[in-house]
Amino acid sequence: MAKVIEGLYYSESHEYVKVEGEYGYIGITDYAQNALGNVVYVDMPDVDDEIEAEEEFGAVESVKAASDLISPVSGTVVEVNDKLEDTPELLNQDAYANWIIKVELSDKAELDGLMDAKAYEEFCNNN
């Protein structure tokens, strides 16, 4: 069973958002890293890029497949996780501890359209 953490927001495309004040840390869920297998590359946007909810902001490549990263929220990229450039397998080790990008949220109301941990767990079990 994939790990799901309380207090995060989840999307149907298996990204999560951890909200701290006006910022959101976006990454892939444990379910996603498990489905992908060994992650070998993470394509990330640049700092100051604008991202839109439900639009692609990068990709994760594994030995099995490549998967687009779909942003659960809109905002401005304020930081990227540089560690993933040299060690993308950190996503396999702990997907929740290793976020991909940090964004300044432009519309917190978008969070209302995402799932909580319980709803996401049910979503994963039914797909």
Image (cartoon, rainbow, N blue to C red):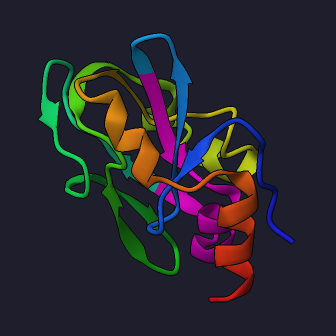
Foreground pick, 58 / 5 = 5
Across and down, in percent, residue 85 comes to 42, 35
Q: Is residue 38 visible?
A: no
Is the residue 22 above or below the residue 62 in the image? above
Identity of the residue furthest to the top in this view: 21
Across and down, in percent, residue 122 comes to 73, 74
Across and down, in percent, residue 52 comes to 17, 44
Q: Quadrant of the N terminus?
A: bottom right
Foreground pick, 50 / 93 = 50
Q: Is residue 98 left or right of residue 73?
A: right
Q: Quadrant of residue 66?
A: bottom left
Q: Is residue 109 visible?
A: yes
Looking at the rendering, the stretch of residues picked out in magenta corresponds to 24-40
Is the residue 50 above or below the residue 47 in the image? below
Residue 34 is inside the magenta segment: yes
Q: Quadrant of residue 23?
A: top left
Residue in the image at 74% along x and 67% along y: 121
Q: Quadrant of the C terminus?
A: bottom right
Residue in the image at 72% along x and 53% along y: 117
Residue 126 is inside the magenta segment: no
Residue in the image at 68% along x and 88% along y: 126
Identity of the residue furthest to the right in this view: 1
Q: How many circles with numbers are drawn on the protein?
A: 0
Q: Is residue 63 left or right of residue 34?
A: left
Across and down, in percent, residue 64 comes to 51, 81
Identity of the residue furthest to the bottom in this view: 127
Residue in the image at 26% along x and 29% along y: 107
Foreground pick, 106 / 27 = 106
